[in-house]
Image (cartoon, rainbow, N blue to C red):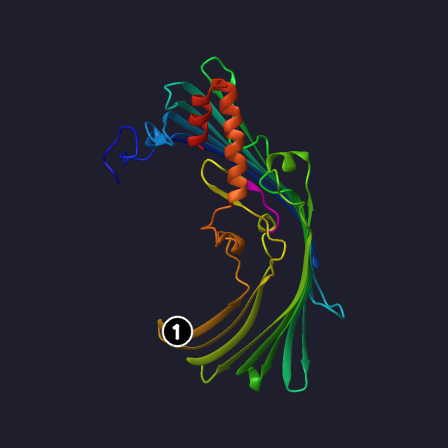
Amino acid sequence: MGVVDGTGPLREQPDPQQAGLDNLTVKVAFDSADHTVTLGADRYSAETDTRILSDYGSVVFGTTVNQRDADDSRDRQRLSLGYRYRGALPFATDIQATLYGQRSETTQRTFERRTTPAHMAQTRHRTSLYEQEVRGANVQLHKPFVLGDSSHHVVYGVDYTVTDSASLRNGGTFDADGQPVREFTRLPTRDFPRTEVTQFALFLQDEIAFLDGALLLSPGLRFDDFSAKAAADQVYFAGNPGTPPPEDYADTVLNAKLGALYSFSERLSAYVRYSEGYRAPPYDDVNVGFSNFLGGYKTISNAQLESERSRGIEVGVRYRHGGGNLRLAAFRNRYANFIDSFAIAPRFLASGSTDRSAFAAAAAGACRVAGRALGSSTGASRGAARHP
């Protein structure tokens, strides 16, 4: 709702932007008395062009940004095959199965015109590419039955997914004559190695009704197997010097849940629920490489991460009367091994969060480059040494 236009950090109005989106979805179903087969296809494409006027005229490390524009695009294709059976098999009365595959690509491009502290004109290009391919299958089965004075509705199945992910950053800075200017980061590079993540899960839940349905119990179990395999190439190592070889990651976990609901009447009911949760470490936290010596920060890998775990309990009351209803709930969740992607590595705390060896090496490299550019005089060497 800003009213100030113009350029620079004081601009309040939105930056000018043009966005286009195309999305086509097609589904075809073949249906019979007991069987349904569904074919699905989805095509998504979006592009956004932005003139970042709020950055025009800003100064970063003494360099003035005269122009900064962005071009972002995203493409996705998805195919799926679904099957559903409704009948009276010994092990299920309802079966749902899906096979699917998806490819997506996100590209971010940035173009800059800028002026250095030495009043030299430069152009700067950056392109970030993120690609991902997902292949998966899941099967879910339902089986109701009666056992003694209780009725059961069992749901069980399997879920399997394979995800391949890759990133690439490229670009360059050029002077007024089109000659490349030295960068503080090596390009092209990858922020994380190519990674294949495989997830496999088995789940089982039973909804049990007692006392003519007044009491419902819902116990459940879920087994998860997670693995991430990293494959670093020369682009990853060249863009992240000193980064250790990436490591694979694997973990398994069994989680349980239990819920109980008791209906005192058609209007009043109470429930209690206990649940356990699990989240594997993000693959780009286990293996990551990014250094920005000019900005003064870097990220490092942590192959010793443990999966996040959680336990929670919730109790509540529900009351319905006429056209209104009332719900009261109290809950408590406890988390273990919480992953913070922006924590300071313990070994850098004593040095004030500074990796002195890395920055000393970067400063020495900058001195050598400046010395070759400015000459071998003593004054030029001292000036280069002070700047880093």
Task: Please name the predominant secondary structure of the magenta segment in the image.
Answer: loop
The reply to whether the magenta stretch includes residue 52 is: no
Q: Can you see residue 98?
A: no
Q: Quadrant of the C terminus?
A: top left
Q: In terms of depth relative to the viewer, which is nearer, 333 or 91?
A: 333
Above or below: residue 315 compared with residue 137: below
Q: In the rendered image, is residue 55 in sight?
A: yes
In front: 263, or 371? Answer: 371
- SS at circle 1: strand
Q: Which quadrant of the rendered structure holds the N terminus?
A: top left
Instruction: Single out the residue that lies furthest toward the right.
Output: 90
Look at the picture and state if 171 lies above or below 206: above
Residue 314: percent from the left, percent from the top?
47, 75
Residue drawn at (62%, 57%) of the image = 304
According to the image, label 1 marks what residue?
A: 327
Q: State the image coordinates of residue 346 (x, y, percent, origin top left).
A: 52, 56
Q: Quadrant of residue 268?
A: bottom left
Which percent across, then down, holds residue 301?
59, 49
Where residue 265 sits: x, y (%)? Answer: 45, 84
Amino acid identity at mark 1: Arg
Residue range corresponding to the magenta coloring: 286-290
Q: Is residue 287 magenta?
A: yes
Q: What residue is rendered at 28% in x and 34% in y?
A: 11
Q: Residue at x 64, y 71 (%)?
A: 221
